[in-house]
Every structure is written in structure tokens, then in C-alpha cells.
């Protein structure tokens, strides 16, 4: 494992980040039990992986609890990233023995009250007195940008947070917040977390020039697109005993993401000969393409449910794509530069409205608002969203 400086910082993080959304069992089959989770975490660490990505909401807060148990073995080695914006676990997993109140207007969002509340709860679950990297999880179209910058800086100055970044936030808001921070001598956001893969490249025209110019790193969520890029749907290697969350959108034209998934499968069809010639797992090749981006620091956040899947993905640190292979993959995936829902715009705008075909069972607005969206009157942006589910 090699290490990269995470964007505009001196922080050294592994060239792959282990996504911990599958560390836990509260999402049923979309996760691993504690024994398998610790086997995955240990396997990643033994290869030199120090960068872990979790959230207050992953596995209904169980992910943070288990990651917190794991990092006690060597707290200083691990760079732990977690997130705020969404409510804590929807069941009794929020660290205080109470289910989340879906009608509490302030237990979600980017605002100061939720930020402080969420960080304090995450610190308890992670069993630590500081968070290495705090991410704003999803843009809420509501909180003033200076409120976010100032509150994050308060937490950095207090020592509870070391670095901060922005996930699923429009590029112009990222630039606005960092310009504000620079002009006032505040700590900037040093990285963004975007959906980025060989079948989702729509952020590139706007984000890549910005990140290069402002020295902002990019961590890439869903780099394997919900397992689609393992090739199992293309090759017909579907195990019915394993969760296949994208499968309904592969097979049923009445599913919401069916057309987008067919487009993505067509991209894989175009790549199949190239991928097969490389003689490495398709998942590892997909990760490697992101790792070798030349103009920005790009770190894939990959998730696995089993130790065997971990070994397959970790092949990405064992080889490099040739210039010709890299260019071929780039050229054969240009369709992915278009939005999966063209009428709604490129990433992150479609994701903020609906979610992603990589996460077909997660509707962003339900996660961000719970049962309060129709109850909150926003005088600044009366209609923050254009579309309804």
C-alpha cells in the first residue's frame, strides 16, 4: 500500500480507503457480522490501509460502534473519517438508548445544532476524543455556507476534529466556502467526496478543474457502483444466495433506475475485451483507473461484505495500468460523462434529488429530511428541490 497526501493537507492516507457502510448487520444482507467485519478491517490494515470511512447513519450507527471497537488496537495509526447531516440510527443504535425521532426538525441537516449533536454522538460511538476527518454528508440547500465553515472551524480549534471535507456538495458551493475560509484565515475543506466510477463520470467537467486549481482531493464513493463493476451482472455470475441490490434494475424495465443501469451495462460491454486482456479482477481494474488519475489526488472508497471480496479489491494495489490501457478505459467510458438523468443535471444534482443507481434503495431526501420536509418553511429557498419521488 502506498500513501497520498489528502488534498490540501499534510495528512498521509492510504491510496485506498475502506468504506465501512457494510460494517454491521442492521441493514440486513447489505453488511457483515462482527467476526467477518473485523476480518475485513484486519485484512485491510495488514496491507497497510489506514484510511477508514464511516458515517453516523451507516448500518443505523452500528458501523461507527464496530469501527470504534476495532481502532482501539492502534488508534494513532488509523485515519477515521465519519459524516454528519443525516439523522443517527433510525432504531436503538444512536448511543443514547433512544430511537431517532423522525419528526425532530433539527436532527438532520448541515446546520450548527445538528453538526455539534452529531459529532458528540459519533465521538462516543467511535470511543475516541477526536475525529480525524469529518465530512458533511449531503448538501441540504438550506444552511448558510458561513454557518458551516464557522462551526467546522470551531470543532477543529477545539481538537475534536482534525480535518474536514464536503460530500455531495455542488462545486460552486465548495469553491465559495473555501474562498471564504481563505479570506478569513479559517481552515479550508481539504477534500470532496463524490460518486466517481467508470460508469459515473458526470462530475468531471466541473469538479476536476476546481480540485486541481484549489488543491482539493477527491475521495470516490461507490467506485464499484453497487457491485456492478465486478462484472457479475455482465458475466452472468450472479449468486442468488448473495445480496444483489442492483439486479432488479438490471432485469425489470419498470424499476426507476432501469434505463440508467442499461446504459451502464452497455459501457461494461464496451470494456469487456479490454478488461479481460488485463488479467486482473474487474473490480480491481475499476479501482485502479481511479487511483491513477493524473491531475488530482483521487482515492477510491471501496466497500466489501466478505473477506474474499476484500482480497479481490486489494489486487488494485498490486499492478498498474499502462498508459494505453488507461487511455482505452477513459475513451470507452465517455458515455458516463452524461448524467444518468439528463433532465436533472450532472452529479451531484441527480443524487440530491433521488439518489444513485449504485444505491437503488436509498432515497436522498428521505434520509436528509425524515418526516419533516413538508413541515419546514424555508424563506431563503421556498422550493429547494425541483422534483418529487
Image: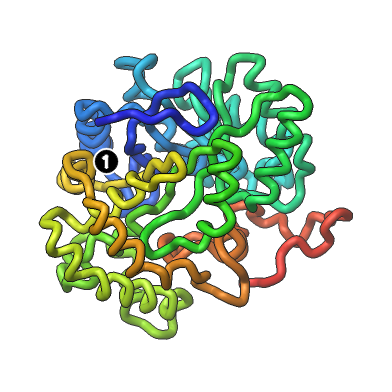
Question: In the rendered image, which quarter contains the C terminus?
Answer: bottom right
Q: Quadrant of residue 266?
A: bottom left
Q: Is residue 57 left or right of residue 14?
A: right
Residue at x 63%, y 51% (from the top left corner):
171
* Residue 212 drawn at (x, y percent): 54, 43
Residue 358 in view here: yes
Horizontally, residue 316 falls left or right of residue 349, namely left
Residue beneath the point at 71% across and 39% down: 177
Q: Quadrant of the N terminus?
A: top left
Q: Secondary structure at mark 1?
A: loop
Choose between 364 and 135: the one closer to the eye: 135
- Spot occupied by residue 361 in the image (x, y as percentages of width and height): 45, 63
Mark 1 lies on residue: 33
Q: Position of 69 compared to 128: left or right?
A: left
Residue at image coords 66%, 53%: 369
Q: Is residue 323 above or below residue 110?
A: below
Tell me if mark 1 has few (under 14), some (14-19) or many (20+) residues whose alpha carbon lies within 10 angstroms of its own.
Answer: some
- Position of residue 73 measured from the top left corner of the image (x, y, whole percent): 30, 16
Q: Nearer the viewer, residue 300 or 2?
A: 2
Q: Residue furthest front?
A: 324
- Along the line of sight, which residue is nearer the eye, 378 or 213? 213
Amino acid at each position: 500500500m502506498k500513501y497520498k497526501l489528502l488534498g490540501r493537507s499534510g495528512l498521509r492516507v492510504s491510496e485506498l480507503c475502506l468504506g465501512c457502510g457494510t460494517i454491521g448487520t442492521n441493514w440486513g444482507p447489505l453488511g457483515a457480522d462482527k467476526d467477518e467485519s473485523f476480518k475485513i478491517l484486519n485484512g485491510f490494515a495488514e496491507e497497510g490501509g489506514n484510511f477508514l470511512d464511516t458515517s453516523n447513519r451507516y448500518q443505523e450507527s452500528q458501523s461507527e460502534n464496530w469501527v470504534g471497537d476495532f481502532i482501539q488496537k492502534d488508534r494513532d495509526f488509523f485515519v477515521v473519517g465519519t459524516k454528519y447531516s443525516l439523522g443517527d440510527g433510525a432504531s436503538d443504535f444512536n448511543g443514547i438508548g433512544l430511537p431517532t425521532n423522525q419528526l425532530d426538525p433539527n436532527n438532520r441537516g448541515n446546520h450548527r445544532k445538528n453538526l455539534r449533536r452529531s459529532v458528540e454522538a459519533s465521538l462516543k460511538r467511535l470511543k475516541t476524543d477526536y475525529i480525524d476527518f469529518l465530512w458533511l454528508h449531503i448538501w441540504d440547500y438550506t444552511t448558510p455556507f458561513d454557518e458551516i465553515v464557522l462551526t467546522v472551524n470551531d470543532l477543529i480549534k477545539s481538537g475534536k476534529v482534525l480535518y474536514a471535507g464536503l460530500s455531495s456538495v455542488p462545486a460552486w458551493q465548495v469553491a465559495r466556502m473555501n474562498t471564504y475560509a481563505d479570506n478569513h484565515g479559517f481552515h479550508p475543506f481539504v477534500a470532496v467526496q463524490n460518486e466517481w466510477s467508470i460508469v459515473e463520470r458526470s462530475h468531471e467537467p466541473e469538479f476536476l478543474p476546481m480540485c486541481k486549481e484549489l488543491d482539493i482531493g477527491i475521495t470516490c464513493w461507490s467506485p464499484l457502483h453497487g457491485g456492478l463493476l465486478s462484472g457479475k451482472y455482465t458475466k452472468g455470475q450472479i449468486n442468488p444466495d448473495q445480496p444483489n441490490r442492483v439486479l432488479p434494475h438490471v432485469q425489470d424495465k419498470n424499476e426507476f433506475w432501469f434505463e440508467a443501469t442499461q446504459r451502464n451495462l452497455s459501457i461494461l460491454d464496451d470494456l469487456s475485451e479490454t478488461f479481460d486482456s488485463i488479467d486482473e479482477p474487474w473490480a480491481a481494474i475499476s479501482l485502479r483507473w481511479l487511483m491513477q488519475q493524473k491531475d488530482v489526488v483521487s482515492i477510491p472508497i471501496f466497500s466489501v461484505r466478505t473477506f474474499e471480496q476484500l482480497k479481490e479489491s486489494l489486487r488494485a494495489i498490486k499492478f498498474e495500468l499502462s498508459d494505453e490501457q488507461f487511455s482505452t478505459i477513459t475513451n470507452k467510458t465517455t458515455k458516463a460523462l452524461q448524467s444518468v438523468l439528463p433532465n436533472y443535471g450532472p452529479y451531484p444534482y441527480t443524487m440530491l434529488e433521488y439518489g444513485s443507481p449504485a444505491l437503488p434503495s436509498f432515497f436522498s431526501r428521505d434520509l436528509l429530511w425524515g418526516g419533516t420536509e413538508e413541515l419546514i418553511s424555508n424563506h431563503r429557498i421556498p422550493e429547494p428541490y425541483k422534483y418529487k419521488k
